Image (cartoon, rainbow, N blue to C red):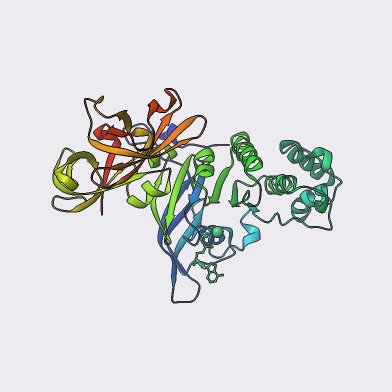
Amino acid sequence: MLQRTSESHTDDTPPQTDVIVRFENVSKTYDQDKIIISGLTLDIERGEFLTLLGPSGSGKSTSLMMLAGFEAPSAGRIYLNGRPIENLPAHKRNIGMVFQNYALFPHMTVAENLAYPLRVRRLAKGIITQRVNRALDMVQMRDFAERKPALLSGGQQQRVALARAIVFQPELILMDEPLGALDKRLREDLQLEIKHLHQELGVTVVYVTHDQSEALTMSDRIAIFNGGRIEQLDKPGALYDAPQTRFVAGFIGDNNAIEGEVVAIRDGLATLVIDHGISILARATNGLSKGQRAIISIRPEKISLRAAGTSSAAQLTASIRDRIYLGDHFQFYAQTDTGTRLLIKQLNVAEGLGLNPGDRCELAWAAEDCIAFRA
Ligand code: ADP
Ligand code: MG
């Protein structure tokens, strides 16, 4: 199913990736005034699970609707399998879709709901039954085939919606916050089920969510949306460990920010001076230069916390303000002597180091765990 072009490739050029969807400089405005999407360029690889992640209103659904064919780009082009699709109506794009509000036909049984897209495609009755049963098996809903949707729970309805999206064997499935209406436990179960389904079917999935842990759980790659633009497109680990912008650093995971001024940059490492003349080393991101104000970003679990006077590598001294016990780990809020409030996470292995609110402490970290962005 996954056809790669690598056999024909003999020299040192990298193997071509197989692109199923291409957004080329796509812009969208609904009213000719406010630009919702601007210059969106994005290649989606065949077989991948790609998530569009960003705050509410950042243009994720609009992008998905343009791919589905329910909205038209105001400028630019979208290609499906190498062909521009602006003249292809939604129902001819052969794309499976799942939305937050299950959108099942209420007057049809579960089985009839699934048979519908196959009847529209004029498949033989025997084949329809076979495919409906197989799809229901994949989402563990075979026992509910004869029920009407109203008699199913939210999670069950969403399983049926999933089955209906895969039953006609589309090569591309779009999902827009499909788990948004479900409670946390069920959402986490279904995240894994959808991920397994993706692996089993080898289908390409474009998934929209505003929930970063959902995106990290499910995705091969994540496109971080902000104000109608992609800030960064990367694998989950790269977004967390090497964010390219301050927005990405703040949106994925918890993060501390310390402000300073760049006094030197060498070999990708910036030296920054913060209050009290303290210098800090950090990885420099693109566009950072000497003399600029910058934000130093460091993850809470990368800070090592010690009682005062016990650390040989202390970078900052601070006072503990709050200590929060969360079972598997402790969260400390420390106020540094330079006036910055920092969040620190420590695994629950040393009983919170015996540190309590009011205690003096020392903070240390490795330079490679700090990233400096333009302020
Ligand atoms: P997201 O899915 O990331 O929350 P949307 O794509 O739904 O973002 O919306 C992006 C922006 O476009 C928002 O400001 C929203 O109000 C606006 N918008 C969305 N749909 C329409 C529409 N049909 N008409 C006018 N404005 C719209
Ligand atoms: Mg949306």
Q: Position of residue 169 (x, y in %)?
A: 67, 44
Nearest the eye: 143 or 260: 260
Q: Quadrant of the N terminus?
A: top right
Among all residues in the image, which is located at the extreme bottom?
Answer: 32
**Residue, x 61% and y 36% (percent of image)?**
192
In the image, residue 310 sits, relative to residue 183, either above or below, namely above
In the image, residue 165 sits, relative to residue 143, either above or below, namely below
Q: Position of residue 261 (x, y in %)?
A: 17, 50
Question: For this view, does 209 lie left or right of residue 193?
Answer: left
Quarter of the image where ligand 2 sits: bottom right
Q: Quadrant of the C terminus?
A: bottom left
Question: For this view, does 225 lie left or right of residue 99?
Answer: left
Nearest the eye: 124 or 57: 57
Q: Is residue 287 visible?
A: no
Q: Position of residue 347 (x, y in %)?
A: 44, 28
**Residue, x 45% and y 56% (percent of image)?**
23
Q: Position of residue 309 (x, y in %)?
A: 24, 27
Nearest the eye: 10 or 70: 70
User: Total of numbered circles in the picture?
Assistant: 0
